[in-house]
Amino acid sequence: MSGRCNGCSGLTAGFGNRAVGWLDAGIQWWHSDNGGFATLMSNLNSLSLPGRPQDTRVVVAMSGGVDSSVVAALLKEQGYDVIGITLQLYDHGEAVQAKGTCCAGQDIHDARRVAEVLNIPHYVLDYEKRFASAVMEEFADSYLSGETPVPCISCNQKIKFNDLLKTTRELGAAVLATGHYISSKKGPGGWELHGAADADRDQSYFLFATTRDQLEILRFPLGALKKSETRALAHKFGLKVAEKSDSQDICFVPTGSYSQVIERLRPDAVLPGDIVALDGEVLGRHDGIINYTVGQRRGLGIAAPEPLFVVRLDAEHSQVVVGPRESLRSTRIWLRDLNWLGEGTFEQIPEKGLELKAKIRSTGAPQAVTLRNQDGVAFVHLHEGEDGVSPGQACVFYDGTRIMGGGWITRAEPENRFVPEKAVRSAEEFVTATTVS
């Protein structure tokens, strides 16, 4: 079944023996096949804004994919004054020094075609220079300093939820809607950020840096939908992107080779150096720390009596530090640039700390942590510990479904900093073996 919901501006689309309504920002409604109806009544529209949809202008960030296209279609169906905006951020041909491989052009074409089908205005904004300086250059510098950066978070923080929000205001729009799988709702202390209903699609890890002020004018219409439901809606609206595959790689690293992009951006900055054991013993040589990541086992180019892993990258001395698996586990991490979305301020958290859950990786399961304020610096104790924690990664906090904020990891350590006896023995055995041979 599908049709317009009497009494509210929205679309329902049937899936099996139920029908999915649109949930966002405090308004939830649905139909069932037996004729039942439920709604949370409010004097606000479905975007939690006063006034009729037709009197409300909304900007939709259109990437050319199925998710943002469905957002634009849903809002148009509900009667909002929708404007689509696509950001030209990069050129694959330039990124890899290859001609004729600009995939961004196809995405822009797809977004424009969707806008034509929906009969909404569509604009393309050239943000290539801004993106290069704020995201790509930072990515290269971070890697060269021995970190493992997450550029998608920086892009959301500095481009999409900063510059694009300014454009939203300039166009006289009330809110900016995106196709992210995440939810927001008005809480007792203001707007809150919550994980998506579909845990497999949840993008909260990449949006932890969203500020309270930004949440006021951001809306996430897909927070209650599964990907299959989004694609079904795209088919219903007649959108040719309904089966378009999701992007998997970092947009400016289309080949998957980070080092290739970094060498292009910083051609004289990649330096060779030593591969060393935890006790400082030199085990081999490397061509640049950008070719290694914390936790890496394969491709080290050294022989040892037991498997060795990259434990940390020392950019100052151009060293790749390796050790046994147990050396990878960290239980203590420190953060910079904390964005706190919980109650009150970070400075007001109890002296004993807060018991929360946290993710160190977007695909990892949240684990129990204690967050403390150590003289103004965010300190996190990982109750179970985590392998392969690297500076530059994000640590994102959760309280149930609510995102409490997060920050960038600057340092990670085990419970104690002593070199494991097994690690010392491994290094000694390696040196002995190579000397004899």
Image (cartoon, rainbow, N blue to C red):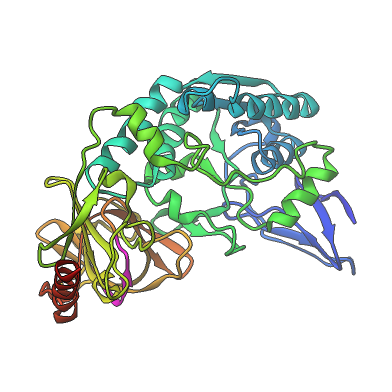
Judged by its main secondary structure, the magenta piece is strand
- Say which residue appears at 34% left-offset and 34% top-offset: 262
Quarter residue 280 falls in? bottom left
Residue 19 or 359: which is nearer the viewer?
359
The reply to whether residue 152 is visible in this rendering is: yes
The reply to whether residue 7 is visible in this rendering is: no
The quarter of the image holding the C terminus is bottom left
Q: Is residue 178 left or right of residue 262?
A: right
Quarter residue 121 falls in? top right
Residue 91 drawn above or below residue 252? above
Residue 349 or 326: which is nearer the viewer?
326
Residue 376 falls inside the magenta stretch: no
Horizontal and vertical percent position of residue 166: 44, 26
Residue 131 drawn above or below residue 155? above
- Say which residue appears at 64% left-offset and 58% top-offset: 224
- Which region of the structure is painted magenta? 382-389
The quarter of the image holding the N terminus is bottom right
Residue 137 or 164: which is nearer the viewer?
137
Residue 273 drawn above or below residue 357? above
Horizontal and vertical percent position of residue 306: 30, 75
- Say which residue appears at 10% left-offset and 67% top-offset: 279
Residue 384 falls inside the magenta stretch: yes
Q: Is residue 349 left or right of residue 216?
A: left
Horizontal and vertical percent position of residue 9: 75, 44
Q: Is residue 70 left or right of residue 138?
A: right
Residue 301 or 193: which is nearer the viewer?
301
